[in-house]
Amino acid sequence: MGGVSQTSPTRPLVGREDELARLTEALDRARGGEARAVLVAGDAGVGKTRMLDEVAGRAAAAGTTVLTGHCVDLGDVGLPYLPFTEILGVLAADERFAPVLAAHPVAERLLGGGPEDDAGAPRSRLLLFEGVAALLTDLADAAPLLLVLEDLHWADQSSRDLLRFLLSRGVLQRHRIAVFASYRADDLYRRHPLRPLLAELVRLPAVERLELRPLPDADVARLVRALRERPLPDTTVHRIVERAEGNAFYAEELVAATDTPAGGVPSGLADVLLIRFEQLSDTAQQVLRTAAVAGRRVGHGLLRDAVGLPEEELESALREAVERQLLVSGDGGAYSFRHALAREAVYADLLPGERARLHGAFARLLAGAGRRSDSAAERAHHYRESHDLPEALAASLEAADHAQRVGAPAEELRHLEAVLDLWSAVDAAARPVGPDAVTLTLRASAAAAHAGELHRAVSLTRSALAGLGQDADLELAARVRYTLAGNLLSVDNLSAAYAHSSEALGLIPAEPPSSTWVWAAATHVTAARQVGENETALRVARRALRVAEDLGVTDARADLLISLTSLEGGNRSTPAGRKRLLEARELARRAGNTPVEMRALFNLAIGCFESGDVEECLFWAAEGLDRARRSGLLSSPYPREMRYLRLLVQYTLGHWDEVLLESAEQAGVRPALSGHALGPGLYVALARGDLGAAERARALLEGPFDWMARMVGGIVLTDAAALRGDAEEAVRWMRSSVEALVLTEAGTRPAVTVRLATLALSAVADTVAELRRAGDGPGAARWTDTAAELLAEARWSAEHGYDDLPQGPEGQAWLARAEAEWSGISAAAPDPASWERAVAAFAYGDPYERARCRLRLAGALLAAGRHQEAAAEADAVRREADRLGATLLRERLDALVRRGGLTDAAPAGGGTAVLTAREQEVLRLLALGRTNRQIGEELFISAKTASVHVSHILAKLGASSRTEAVAVAYRQGLVAPEPTASG
């Protein structure tokens, strides 16, 4: 199947040999059946499009099918799946692809002609994604496929989600597919929505990032001279090179401006673009102004109808614009501005009235017969810019409906917010027939919640509540209130949530039974649980469950089963509780209610953690995050909790390098999730002696209150103070943290209290020991009183965990450590037996805390005169500290070894590098000659992660190359020669 090229290079490609080689290599690997993706980054005008044109042209000449899709800046209006829709449109216009398209209904659906899917947005979205993937792989089976996506910085969220699915799920693996996607690096501000996706994608083995930096002056000079048939004076070339500053597009525009009578070149690029524009005939300028209003790309027919010129005059004007390199002709009779900056400059030069008139013309044309149904977003944009508010309102509502059908909640939210902004400005008689403003606001709040904008969801639901009139329908009034209650629960405003859920349940009668009452009851049960009203919650839940079963409200039944798991005794950490949660999960999945399914998966995961089954916890957390990713719900509350839980389990199991890598990649790209995403990474950083960990933890406490950030910050700052030996600071952080966390825990202490109290208690124990050695009896007595208070806090917390039941293995292990710390405070010397119990308690799966307890045990054994046993414990601590890279623990161990004369424990700095367990595994494969990619495949990590490990190994061994590192490792005995087969 021949290539389909949508590119038309207009200037020579100068320089970029290295970048071109990398793209060519990626294409070659893709042709060999190894799917590859390259993210091409660079400032506006640096040459991304030109280089991709060159590669695409070569690929098409070699028999590769080349498909190009563009993202478009429509302001606040989202146009779901635009680049993929463009690609499918090109395929649909080519008869050669008709058999492949006929086998994949997804094409018809994205192009606006497919049937609606009643299976629910998340399910519909997954089917759409899988359909696109299947279509692409079928195309690649016929011929190698190059997919070019331009201007990702303007991509709508749905397109970003689809790209994530295609690359991160491995659906293109082992197919002859390459994906090259470009974006403007200078457009990516700190919270740009593309940043998290880029951070996620570059971690994948098959994805690489290619940055186009400004061209060297010599290459710019070559480009300037190549652009003109007649040579330019050297002074002119030098001036252009100087002003272009390595930007190929600047250089090209400056060269084109040299023919202007004015002679001088303006300093701003916009001025340069407009000088070229003003050199066109009046008719060509009129055509370009009209095209600029349409957007970066416009079809010939639509442009013809909008500009209103005879065909011959239009073609003459277009030819002039193309020859002057302002427009580029493409396949399917479409024209594009050669660069987005050119379009922006022309658009900005329009008079306000002219701009409004042209937007109105495009809106009316798009609304005409034969236009695609998915053009509503574009029509809404044009109507709004033309100040036709009634039509803008109708089109925005239609666009919201389309976004909902294709599973694009972020775009649905933006369109609904546009509807709400326009609502009061449009006369009631001119508004679309259908829902009122309150119902639309309620729908917008649901879209916000699905998109993870939780505080926006609360704000919208409060607006809906304020919009209810005195004669409002009771069911609607109840629905608004219980929706507000649910949204308030997601932001930890528990008392307000309970108040609104109570109002909702009071508004709607239980008889006759209704689904509205069932959901009001289900929400009230959750809110009542959170504020400690368990009897009320149990009574309402049992009754609502019966009604839900009678009415067949399956997802509400699932939600109630989750709540009853905690209320009826067999909580989530027990086999009976897990059985009920599995039933709830299946019911929610069957009903297509992904948020309720997420709640069940989270409870399964946290229940496993609470029972000490950390490996099973990791399974359920991964399952939940995968489900959330496929449904576009990664930013919603339960997946956020599962992200923290997954990292916490990795930290607990001692997979510290992986925790740090993922935490570092999350930093800065998900600020709203900082406590969830960064917490375990801070625990590792502190243990490894990172002095900035405490400051980063303190930064988490800035801004509005966030429960998770407060908990993480409290743990790190309390532990940091204890490690410094600052008992006063440790106790202060412990108490302030518990007090802050109690505010949203219905007056009960949070489960983390036992950990915080124990960390503070360790600092107090050290202080008491020092005071006793100094002979300060009164000082030791004062701190002993503080220790008794901390111990009481730890004991109470361990006995009153989730559901007011004793905490599981983790909580009991922290209590055992607290009791052991107390043994050294309440008596003349620490009790070795107490520390042995603490060591045994952490054997459920936390090697770091177990090693910390063993260090204390070694000290207690020393104090009891049991030197040989102390040396054995010290040696075990040394091995674990070195494996984890826990430098602070190793420092404390070395101090104990020196103080107690435990010569059996190897001292630090003995000439042998300290490698973590994962680094040992990487070193073994390195010695076998494995590449980073091969190491990653054998250890089930990415090639990038393997590269990071290799860099750490080289640094620790003081080696400048992989070969030297292996040689050093053999000399130090870090790796053993592989056995060879005998004769």
Image (tube, rainbow, N blue to C red):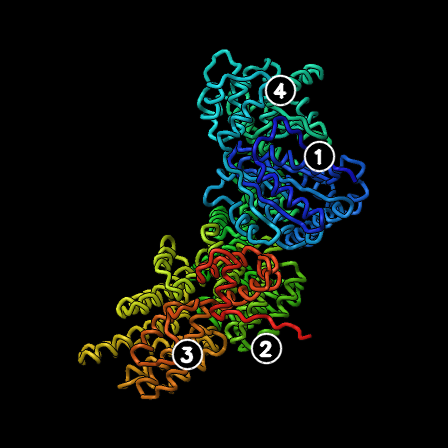
**Mark 1 closeness class: few <14, some 14–19, many ≥20 residues within 10 Å:** many
Considering the numbered disc 1 on the image, is that residue within a helix, a strand or a loop?
Answer: loop
Residue 576: mark: 2
Q: Which residue is denoted by mark 4 in the rendering?
A: 321
| Closest to the observer, 509 or 135 | 135
- Work out whether mark 4 precedes mark 3 in sequence or the reverse, and give the earlier one: 4
Residue 5: mark: 1
- Work out whether mark 3 precedes mark 1 in sequence or the reverse, and give the earlier one: 1
Residue positioned 55% across, 77% down in the render: 574
Amino acid at dot 2: Ala
**Mark 2 closeness class: few <14, some 14–19, many ≥20 residues within 10 Å:** few
Name the image quarter holding residue 797. bottom left
Q: CA distance from mark 4 to mark 1?
A: 22 Å
* Nearer the camera: disc 4 or disc 2: 4
Q: CA distance from mark 3 to mark 1?
A: 66 Å
Residue 217: mark: none
Q: x, y (%) of residue 410?
A: 56, 46
Q: Are marks 4 and 2 in contact (CB under 8 Å)?
A: no
**Mark 4 closeness class: few <14, some 14–19, many ≥20 residues within 10 Å:** many
**Does residue 805 appear to the left or right of 65 in the view shown?**
left
Q: CA distance from mark 2 to mark 1?
A: 60 Å
Considering the numbered disc 4 on the image, is that residue within a helix, a strand or a loop?
Answer: helix
- Work out whether mark 4 precedes mark 1 in sequence or the reverse, and give the earlier one: 1
Amino acid at dot 4: Ala
Amino acid at dot 3: Asp
| Res. 605 visible in picture | yes
* Nearer the camera: disc 4 or disc 3: 3
| Res. 529 visible in picture | no
Q: Which residue is denoted by mark 3 in the rendering?
A: 875
